[in-house]
Image (cartoon, rainbow, N blue to C red):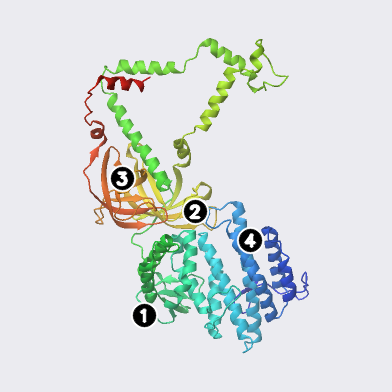
């Protein structure tokens, strides 16, 4: 590969190279029809080799464009099938998924280099009136595939290569220089009429939408929604908007917000104005209904776009680099479970210290309990010896003629000791409790602190240790200190990014509150009282910012004005959710007001019993004891 005279990456042409077959549109059509559709690996390998072969062969620009346009729909369908294996799955990729992602990038790169070769040939020969349509089509398709590469990088939370930005800016500059940026085009995919400028603005809007703060499915939804809003955005060399985004066409950096932009000497600056776009977004947000397609996700995405395009980005706190380890729990369920265990263990420890000071009155009982416990698993010596003698026979098949037999002729069919032992093991496996399964999945993990500030942390976790449910918007519990000084803080993941070197994931976490309490909440309404209790977190009031106490719930079951029954340690009360503070795909944060007095578990258990009016009541109670 080399950089051509236009500044685009192309493959070096081989003068004496002969392709595997004659590169004509008819031959390429027949070849593409014979690809094994069921075998993705073989089809991908064939398409990649054919594209690489064609990009090194001397072909006329018009015929090269026809050939690539024939292969492009087949390759696009193949790429969509391959992307399902690593998109909308676990953030951390396995070795197989990384290889598939690299293959997808290689195919898209070869297609874009084919269009680069068309552009290089047309411009080097001189743009004529007859070749303007060929140039416009090649530039449009090249911009399209650069946008697909950028989209995939964002969905994988990887950094976009600087070469992609540089070539994308160069393509748009050539489109403006040759006055083909506003020509409307329509291709084989039956898409709406669009222009090179609109496609370029669509990619710029995606880059300014803070995609690292979204989930993979939400990034894809933004990409699908942006064509409806491109016409409300202006891209000019001089814009007087309050919060425009700047693009330096001579750089290899993504568009930057005005507050973060640094002037450069050789800049060719463009500005994106989103004032009219914000008004359109607010109107669409008000019109979204619950019955609409993607209503919940679409509402969340529209709120995110309004937030990131209407407010200037600035850092409130300075970062401090660090190289320490910190224990974390990822997820609302894991944090609730582990925090509950910690508080119960702390409460039991305090109770144990109190019991140790009760005097000699309980000493005798404690000694008896200890002695009783030591005798619970005692076994008669004769039975133990018998089990030891049968341990050798345990691995033999009782129907085998080579099995060791006892003097008892029924020993082959009846082996009570071994049967009981195997049945107990099977029963232990089959009756594995849900708590044990949860205990295995909810773990405290060690992560590395990259930097910290009063507002939050940047942590780094190995991809192999990252839970499958880890995403942006996920709740994270931080365990700081040891022993009696240990305390928990709660944060939420604001952005995710994959490191360039090493299989590590970095997360930016915003701290929400310290000293959080795990609670259980039950939805209360007039139709049914059979709702089960669900995990939630109670955040204390933050007097410094004027925020009252809030509740963090799951994102599906609860809404504003819901009445909840709250179980907090040994206290119970009812609340009404009054306002939604934050929401994500993993949790929602509400402010609330209490609508019932607080009652304790002791008060509920000490309610007056009903008087017994008949002696038959005593007899009826006996049946439960038998």
The answer to whether residue 312 shows anywhere in this view is no
Based on the displayed image, in which of its 4 quarters is residue 36 positioned?
A: bottom right
Q: Residues within 10 Å of mark 4 (few under 14, many from 20)?
A: some
Q: Is residue 255 left or right of residue 131?
A: left
**Which label number is shown at residue 505?**
2
Q: In the structure shown, which secondary structural element does the residue marked by tag 4 occupy?
A: helix
The residue beneath circle 3 is 515
Q: Residue 162 placed where, x, y %?
A: 54, 68
* Tag 1 near tag 3, CB within 8 Å: no
Q: Answer with left or right where residue 396 lies relative to residue 607.
A: right
Q: Residue at x 55, y 67 (%)?
A: 148
- Quadrant where the N terminus lies? bottom right
Up-down relation of residue 178 to residue 520 (above or below): below
The answer to whether the residues at label 4 and label 1 have Cβ atoms under 8 Å apart is no
Q: Is residue 625 visible?
A: yes
Location of mark 4 (residue): 103
Instruction: Tell me the distance, in whole angstroms, between the alpha carbons under discs 4 and 1.
Output: 44 Å
- Residue 117 picture quarter: bottom right
The image position of residue 558, as x and y in percent, is 35, 52
Residue 93 placement (x, y as % from top left): 56, 53
Secondary-structure class at tag 3: loop
Sooner in the amino-acid sequence: mark 2 or mark 3: 2
Q: CA distance from mark 2 to mark 4?
A: 22 Å
On screen, 280 above or below 512? below
In the displayed structure image, the side of residue 607 where residue 296 appears, left or right = right
Q: Which mark is residue 240?
A: 1
């Amino acid at each position: 590969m080399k950089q051509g005279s236009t500044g685009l990456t192309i493959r070096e042409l081989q003068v004496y190279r002969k392709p595997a077959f004659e590169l004509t549109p008819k031959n390429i059509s027949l070849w593409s029809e014979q690809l094994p559709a069921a075998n993705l690996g073989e089809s991908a390998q064939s398409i990649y080799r054919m594209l690489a072969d064609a990009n090194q062969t001397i072909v006329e620009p018009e015929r090269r464009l026809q050939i690539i346009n024939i292969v492009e729909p087949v390759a696009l369908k193949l790429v969509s099938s391959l992307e399902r294996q690593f998109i909308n799955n676990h953030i951390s990729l396995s070795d197989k998924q990384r290889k598939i992602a690299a293959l997808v990038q290689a195919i898209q790169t070869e297609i874009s280099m084919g269009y680069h070769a068309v552009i290089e040939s047309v411009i080097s020969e001189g743009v004529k009136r007859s070749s303007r349509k060929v140039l416009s089509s090649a530039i449009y398709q090249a911009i399209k595939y650069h946008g697909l590469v950028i989209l995939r990088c964002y969905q994988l939370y990887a950094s976009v290569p600087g070469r992609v930005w540089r070539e994308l800016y160069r393509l748009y500059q050539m489109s403006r220089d040759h006055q083909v940026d506003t020509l409307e085009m329509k291709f084989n995919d039956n898409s709406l009429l669009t222009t090179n400028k609109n496609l370029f603005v669509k990619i710029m809007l995606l880059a300014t939408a803070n995609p690292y703060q979204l989930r993979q499915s939400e990034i894809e939804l933004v990409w699908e929604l942006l064509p409806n809003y491109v016409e409300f955005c202006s891209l000019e060399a001089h814009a007087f908007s309050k919060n425009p985004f700047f693009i330096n066409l001579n750089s290899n950096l993504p568009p930057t917000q005005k507050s973060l932009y640094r002037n450069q000497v050789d800049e060719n600056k463009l500005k994106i104005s989103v004032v009219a776009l914000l008004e359109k977004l607010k109107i669409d947000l008000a019109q979204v209904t619950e019955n609409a397609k993607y209503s919940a996700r679409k509402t969340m995405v529209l709120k995110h776009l309004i937030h990131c395009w209407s407010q200037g980005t600035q850092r409130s706190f300075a970062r401090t680099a660090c190289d320490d380890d910190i224990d974390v729990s990822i997820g609302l369920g894991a944090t609730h479970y582990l925090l509950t265990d910690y508080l119960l263990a702390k409460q039991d420890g305090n109770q144990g210290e109190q019991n140790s000071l009760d005097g000699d009155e309980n000493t005798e009982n404690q000694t008896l309990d200890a002695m009783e416990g030591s005798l619970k698993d005692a076994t008669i010596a004769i039975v133990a010896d018998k089990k030891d003698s049968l341990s050798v026979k345990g691995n033999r098949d009782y129907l085998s003629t080579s099995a060791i037999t006892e003097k008892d002729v029924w020993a082959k069919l009846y082996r009570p000791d071994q049967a009981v032992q195997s049945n107990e093991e099977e029963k232990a496996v089959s009756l594995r409790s849900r708590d044990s399964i949860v205990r295995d999945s909810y773990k405290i993990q060690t992560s590395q602190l990259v930097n910290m500030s009063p507002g939050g942390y940047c942590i780094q976790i190995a991809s192999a240790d990252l839970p499958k449910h880890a995403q942006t918007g996920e709740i994270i519990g931080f365990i700081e200190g040891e022993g009696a000084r240990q305390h928990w803080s709660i944060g939420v993941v604001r952005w995710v990014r994959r490191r360039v070197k090493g299989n590590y994931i970095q997360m930016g976490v915003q701290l929400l509150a310290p000293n959080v309490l795990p609670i259980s909440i039950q939805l209360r309404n007039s139709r049914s009282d059979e709702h089960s209790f669900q995990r939630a977190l109670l955040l204390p009031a933050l007097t410094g910012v004027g925020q009252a106490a809030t509740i963090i719930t799951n994102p599906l079951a609860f809404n504003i004005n819901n009445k909840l029954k709250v179980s907090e340690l040994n206290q119970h009360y009812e609340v009404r959710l009054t306002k939604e503070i934050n929401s994500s795909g993993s949790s929602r944060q509400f402010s609330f007001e209490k609508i019932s007095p607080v009652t304790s578990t002791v008060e509920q258990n000490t309610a007056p019993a009903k008087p017994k009016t008949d002696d038959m009541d005593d007899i009826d109670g006996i049946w439960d004891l038998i």
